[in-house]
Amino acid sequence: MSDKRQRARVQGSWAKQLPKHSGPPGGTLLNNQQPAARSANPASASWKSEAQQTAKTFEFQQPAKLLREAPPEKTIKSEGDYEISPGPSGASRLRLLPGFLAPEEADWMFSKLLAELPWSQKTNYRQGEAYDEPRLTCWYGELPYTYARSTMAANPEWHPLLLTLREAVEQASGSRFNSLLCNLYRDGHDSIGWHSDDEASLGARPTIASLSLGDTRVFSLRKQPPPEDNGDYTYVERIRVPLSHGTLLLMEGATQDDWQHQVSKEYHDRGPRVNLTFRTIHPEPEGHRPGTKLHFTPKQP
Ligand SMILES: O=C(O)CCC(=O)C(=O)O
């Protein structure tokens, strides 16, 4: 348990001082008695009572405030529509469709995409420092896409299989997509950290469709903390969504405003996984810095 949560749970307080009473002279002088008190009248019977006044007793008192605990993490596994929060920016919704692709279909598509897409490792920037994104990616769309201060060039020549999949995903979601970020997690050590897909180029309240092939990885979400928590995620709601071979996940409504997501590293055996995230990219307005976030996120520990 984190030190902070521990402190929030275990609360006691110093008891009030015991009531004064005088006793016989000759008591023990405590270290924190003031010299002035000692010299006032050393012969008087006040020594012990003063010592008793400074003695502290630890006694449990009911905490004044309700104890704060993180809500239990939820897991979403079954097909369905889920409203994961009603606000603050409006409803955030997930739709999960396990088995969107039949297993045999998903098998050959996975092998083909693994072998034929132009996978490469992107260099990103954080606080001026370059780092290699711990997964491989490629981008399709008429427009470039910038995230983590690095730009993927426009690539309008879609692989034919990706065009077929886009059509199927558009039919299922009722949304249109002009772009696709393809991700390859080579093994359990590949990952993507906490973020929201909230670059201005994605527009307000974007629908994002995420199709997974290959080994199962856990897609985690955490709610943005309220402003008074100053970017502290200790007590926020959390959801896990295991994404298996052939599963389609739609993120809709305010999900990118009010939640972050990640695929964290896993330290047991994990095989490769391809993830296709269909999006719609809008042209950046004149004079706009590419990759700018719609919302400022204070901290991302
Ligand atoms: O791999 C996934 O399931 C999520 C990918 C993702 O969050 C992203 O590329 O923005």
Image: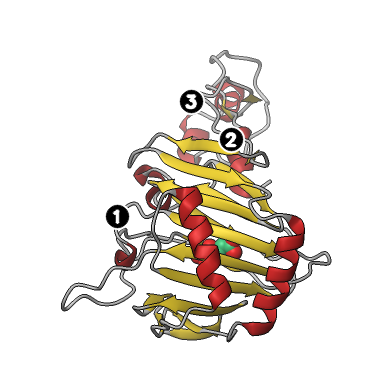
- The numbered mark at residue 215 is none
Q: Which residue is mark 1?
A: 204
**Is 135 placed above or below 18 here?**
below
> Which image quadrant is residue 290 in?
bottom left
Picture layout, residue 6 above or below residue 149: above
Of circles 3 and 1, which is in front? Answer: 1
Give the residue type at disc 2. Pro
Secondary structure at badge 1 equals loop
Alpha carbon separation for disc pair 1 and 2? 28 Å
Badge 1 amino acid = Ala
Q: Position of residue 105 (x, y in %)?
A: 71, 62
* Residue 257 place in picture, x, y as percent: 37, 51
Residue 31, can we see it? no
CA–CA distance in space, label 3 to label 1: 38 Å
Residue that label 3 marks = 65
Q: Quadrant of ligand 1?
A: bottom right
- Categorize mark 2 by other alpha carbons within 10 Å: few (<14), some (14-19), many (20+): few
